[in-house]
Amino acid sequence: MGLPTARQPLFKITTRWRSLELLKHHRPLGLANIASGSRRAFDIAQDRPVQPVTLLRPHAAHRAARYFIEKFPGRSLYAVKANPSPDLLKVLWDAGITHYDVASMGEVRLVRDTLPEAVLCFMHPVKAEEAIAQAYHDYGVRTFSLDTIEELEKIVRATSTGGVAPSDLNLLVRLRVSSEHAKYSLASKFGADPAELKQLLIAARQASDAMGICFHVGSQAMSPAAYADAMGRVRDAIIEAAITVDIVDVGGGFPSTYPGMEPPPLENYFQIIHSAFEALPISYSAELWCEPGRALCAEYASLLVRVEKRRGDELYINDGAYGALFDAAHVGWRFPVALQRDSKAKPVGFSFYGPTCDDLDHMAGPFELPADIQAGDYVEIGMLGAYGCAMRTQFNGFGVDAVEVVDDEPMATLYGSSRDVARSNVVTL
């Protein structure tokens, strides 16, 4: 079997690879207790920074990673696209995440340079042949996803040596599944054509050492039913093609919590996935994977911004659509906000304008803040560790921000009650 290893073998390997035993992590959630008098967003606001300040909470990412490692009934791969920060990658690695979902050579190089022992899985279904060859021959990547016969042929061709096809490929065929339960649909761009799926699965089985099926239910899936429905498609595909499958990868889509989007507990998702997996005809010999991105890093970062101007119920702030607030501008995402001073004024809804000269640099919200907010005030915008940091640009000369590590808790969490959060532990970068 050709699955690469990180620190320790991923599985105890038998002659057929079919009998697998997951290596379990035994470290408890968290590290040392939070020190009293720790630095908070409020403290940084007292410094009156001119530029936006990204506030990092490594303890929150560590806690999320431990949660997945200890509670998800299989292997968790971090989806690097959600936040490719090297500091975050190190936090996740230290927490026990050893496998990483990469989608480009940029991400391959980043993770390999940051975490030399990490296992890389190239999960973009459409790749340049040159990228496949470089990933395989130069960076030791053995796991690839695909959704067409053409991509399969490309992978085999790019990884061959002297005209001899490799014998150590782990190939995952991506199914097309519904995104009806997700806030962001990922149902149209990727996924095998149902009419070609049987042929593709059989061909991938013949070309691979370990063969799998993967899917993505969409980003911010608000119901565990999303995974139950998709696993039904997996079952149908396996039965129709009459093949043995070594890996079932349920992809990402695991949610975080935002205003107006409070999902069920993550354990509900895990239970549904586990039950559906156990009902598959290959569950006795297959490995279960997932690829959390948002769920591992949303709580990792928030943003401290300054109000530069107020115009009625519109606030002009020093970050926006071309910075960390892309989702708030382009898809109407709402994030938790908190004024960083005492106020007894009634909360009211505001919209935001970002710092650029573009009218599209507008976040409709509404964002609930005290009615007496004014220019010069500071606002923390929470839950921006996923995609906010990753999508920042320097359009119009903006986008330069400071970074501070803070020890206070994120503005929302899926990893325990508020009491549990208060007792949670921290790490430093």
Image (spheres, rainbow, N blue to C red):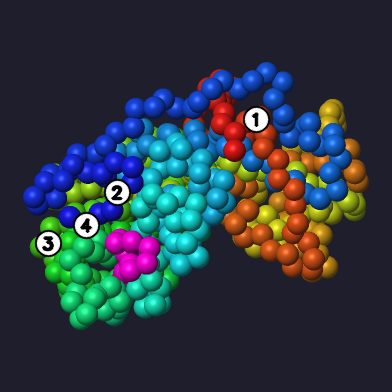
Q: Residues within 10 Å of mark 1 (few under 14, many from 20)?
A: many
Asked if the residue under mark 2 is in contact with the one under mark 4, i.e. CB atoms within 8 Å, the reply is no
- Is residue 37 on the magenta stretch? no
In-image side of 357 versus 88 (left or right): right
The mark nearer the N terminus, 2 or 1, is 2
Q: Which residue is at a point 59% across and 33% down the rendered structure image?
A: 428
Q: Is residue 315 left or right of residue 10?
A: right
N-terminal label among 2 and 3: 2
Say whether residue 306 is visible: yes
Q: Amino acid at mark 4?
A: Gly
Residue at mark 4 = 2
Q: Secondary structure at mark 1?
A: loop
Above/below status of 123 relative to 182: below
Which badge, 3 or 4, comes first in the chain's sequence?
Answer: 4
The kind of secondary structure element at disc 3 is loop
Q: Which residue is mark 1?
A: 407
- State which mark lies toward you, 3 or 4: 4
Quote the CA–CA distance across marks 1 and 4.
41 Å
Q: Alpha-carbon distance for marks 4 and 2?
A: 9 Å
Amino acid at dot 1:
Asp
Foreground mark, 3 or 1, reads 1
Residue 243's label in the rendered image is: 3
Q: Bounds of the magenta span? A: 136-148
Residue 200 vertical placement versus 54 (above, below): below
At label 4, counting other C-alpha atoms closer than 10 Å, the crowd grade (few under 14, some 14-19, many 20 or more) is some
- For label 2, the residue is 5
Residue at 18%, 77% (x, y): give it. Answer: 164
Q: Is residue 220 above or below residue 71?
A: below
Crowdedness of circle 2 by 10 Å Cα count: few (<14), some, many (20+)?
Answer: some
